[in-house]
Image (spheres, rainbow, N blue to C red):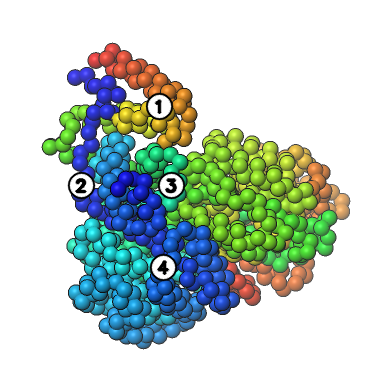
Amino acid sequence: MKPKSYEKLLEETAAPPPDPQARVLAKRAALAEFNRVHAAAAAQQPKLGFFQGLSGAFRHSRESQSHGSDVMGWNSKSRMLAGAASICVAVLGFAVIWPMMKNGDAARLLEKTPAESVAVEPVRSDVPAAGPAASASTMSETPAIAATAPAQTPGTAEAASRRSADVQRPPVRVEAENKVAQSGEETFAFAPPTEAPLAATGAVKDERAQQDAPVAVDAITVEDIGKLPDTSANEALQRVPNVRVDRQPPADPASAAPPKSREADSLNEVIVTGARGRSKAAPHKGVAPPAGGGANPFEGMLARRANIAIEPKAAEPPEGRDKFEHFDLNTVKQVAEGENRFSTFSADVDTSSYSFVRRQLNAGILPQKDAVRSEEMINYFDYSWPVAESRERPFRPTVVVSDSPWGKGRKLVHIGIKGYELDARQRPDANLVLLLDVSGSMSSPDKLPLVKESMRMMVNGLKATDSVAIVVYAGAAGMVLPPTPVGEKEKILAALESLTPGGSTAGAEGIELAYQLAERSFRKEGVNRILLCTDGDFNVGIDNTNELKGFVERRREKGIFLSVLGFGQGNYRDELAQALAQNGNGVAAYIDTLSEAQKVLVKEAGASLFTIAKDVKLQVEFNPATVAEYRLVGYETRALKREDFNNDAVDAGDVGSGHSVTAIYEITPVGVDARMIEPSRYAKEKAPAAVSGTGGEYGFLRIRYKLPESRQSQLIEEPIGMERKQVPETISRDVQFSTAVAGFAQLLRGGQYTGALSYDDVIKQALAARGDDPFGYRNEFVQLVRRAQGARGM
Amino acid sequence: MDDQALIRKAQGGDANSFAELLDLHYDTIYRFAWKWCGHKANAEDIAQLACIKLASSLKQFRFQSAFTSWLYRLVISCAQDWQRSQARHDHDEMPETETVGESSPAEDRIYLTQLLEQLGELGEGMKETALLVHAEGMSHAEAGVVLGVSESTISWRLHTIRKHMSKSEARQSSNG
């Protein structure tokens, strides 16, 4: 039979009627979202004065968060609440926030004394019975809720006991949160499964209370991640949407209510588990709190933690679809073979590989091999290589030779350089354009919400004379904020706060618009940079990668640089981010947690934003008289040809203020029986006699760089001496630590060249070389190695 | 109450009005989603996403275009987001099995699914264009507003589609 014409087919084929249940679910999810959105707008207003008074006591990001929310409330056209409701909300807000203020400490306490949290439990279990003051005040206005309340007693008791079963729960968030939680559950979990409940204004108000909780709660979740040495909170950012399903009796009609959420992944989970419409979204800052009320983010988080312990499979984040450029490891090279004695590569100050690996390991998964770039792992850490004295000659190379811990008889040559550090007064003004992906895929908490947090932190660290503009791309590209001096910080923060994810990623003009703005407010003497924040769904209109690179490269000539900050996972296109940043004279960083944002955008803002040297190339020429073989650890993706070294037209990596770059060679000295490559049977191999005067050298280091505004490269040279130099203790410690990191990276890549080295050895080395570790990064590294021991392969 | 008044009230935060708005438009959303993907359960998913999206972005509706145009655009973007997430996540989609008591003959729906697939392969915006014009009965200008392209682009796309379809039809009939 011939089918109808396609027009007829389109026109006449009728859809089967939708499942009424699906309709109800969709509507309920939408209404929950609706209430959340409007509650968010309305509830913030009364808290304005309150927060301003207290903000000093808050930790940095929380301050900015509440601050941002104020602005949002300010902008909102929503009507003010009636006076009583305002007070009620303020009280609730306080009740929620106050324990939060302490929560950081509490979490730490918990690490030491798990018993304490158990001790606190009874207090919490009492709460529902006591009839919490906050929710009572809400109820007094909302007969609808009061009416349903009595029927709930058994349910709330059950909920409470369920909570007390969570022994791991940090102790402090307690009463207030529970109050909110209860009030939330009262309206939601026990509302009859009709379509009506939202009609009651009470529900709306209650939503407000509810809405406060997840927001504040999530702020902590995000913030504390990475700060806790064992990163126990890290799972909070891993999306494990199907966890709640296990905890909810499927028969509970209310649990069927939560939105499948905009989060695509949870949608997927729904299908996978067959529990269509019943899954819970992971705790979301941006998305409607599911029916369970304010306590959900915690419960979800804890459930997830517990779940991971029992069955890691359940905690599987959508990994594996992140794209990494494949590269082969550097091989061992024989110095005797002519050209081979030259090793040339570009500096790389990116660190995204480390953050990505950390994230995967924290989820209990070994990262894919191509995600492990040894040099980025090594360069993640700050080393105490001596700093150059002047801006004109911004590097002073440090060369240290030590014994290889994984190859008997072999040596490691560390080459460390640290970029000159500009102090605050020397910093040029910055003209920054934030190009933010706000597509629907950015809605999960580790994406747009984290982007906003991060950007807020960065803006707070800028000078008043710097300027910031914001361009978003999604369904349509648009300028959210014209170039605005940081002196008017309020405006910038308000604009950031107003961003919501939505639309598909297709902002054709996004990147062009960003460059236009950067040109418009171009600062000849300053730094002009575009910061692109994306989860990898990177479609800025020019979709041919090479074309895009070319575009970025041409703008680079005009003095506008591009840095790429990657967020989220599941769809991260690392290779593109890397390529763009490299072509745009910028860094590519991967931001998985707020503390990583702190590191990249605040602590190392100088390095990320202010380039002190561009096109930095390194070349080592090994001395065939003394070195038989060598192997460069990492820098595979940064290799250059020998002739590129002196060619100033060839682009290479840039080094920012205070950035350190470390390269490690493993060499086999002549005469040591540790060679990897068999000597040839036919070609007579004989170590050539040393050129006079160089007999005591393993090789010769050359560094080429250009000053930021120069087109001509400069050269720094330094011989690599054979004798062991006496180095300060800080340096020998850093040599050892970077060796441990290099060992770890190589193990993750398969341990092809590391002999019998084991994770335990790495831990031992790292522990011995931990030093002061004021920010805990090195401790975290040790934890990661431990996790790698227990992780399963992908 | 007409759409406009409802929307204004909903934008002001009135949940009742929003609920009413949803009631009025759920069927449109679902039906369009169904034509977009040809699969009931997926259409329900898309429709739900669209409803949630509607809740969060209704405030951004500025009455500059017809609400339905705006709504179609929203549903399309949800559908595309949804599809992207599907492409990323699973490949074990179960084909739709229920055939009895449905409103269209089963073979029509199978043809439709094939057609949608073909249209999807024609390039970005093609499927949407065909759906808006042929299934929803929009004029080229209206479809242009929804998709954010000019009227002539729509005409060109339809022309391309027609050309492609007649070619593939010719191929089919010559084969059998």
Answer above or below: position of A297 versus A502.
below
Q: Are marks 3 and 4 on the same chain?
A: no
Mark 4 closeness class: few <14, some 14–19, many ≥20 residues within 10 Å: some
- The residues tagged by marks 3 and 2 sit, at their Cα atoms, a distance apart of 29 Å
- The residues tagged by marks 2 and 1 sit, at their Cα atoms, a distance apart of 32 Å
First in sequence: mark 2 vs mark 4? 2
Residue at (19, 74) in percent of width and height: A151
Q: What's the amino acid at mark 2?
A: Asp
Q: What's the amino acid at mark 4?
A: Leu
Circle 4 chain: A
Specify whether residue A759 is in view.
Answer: no
The dot on residue A400 is: none
First in sequence: mark 3 vs mark 1? 3
Residue linked to disc 4:
A81
- The residues tagged by marks 3 and 4 sit, at their Cα atoms, a distance apart of 23 Å
Answer above or below: position of A551 versus A66.
above
Mark 3 closeness class: few <14, some 14–19, many ≥20 residues within 10 Å: some
Residue A282 horizontal side relative to residue A416, left or right? left
Mark 1 closeness class: few <14, some 14–19, many ≥20 residues within 10 Å: some
Residue at (83, 55) in percent of width and height: A392
Q: Quadrant of residue A611?
A: bottom right
- 2 vs 1, front mark: 1
The dot on residue B140 is: 1
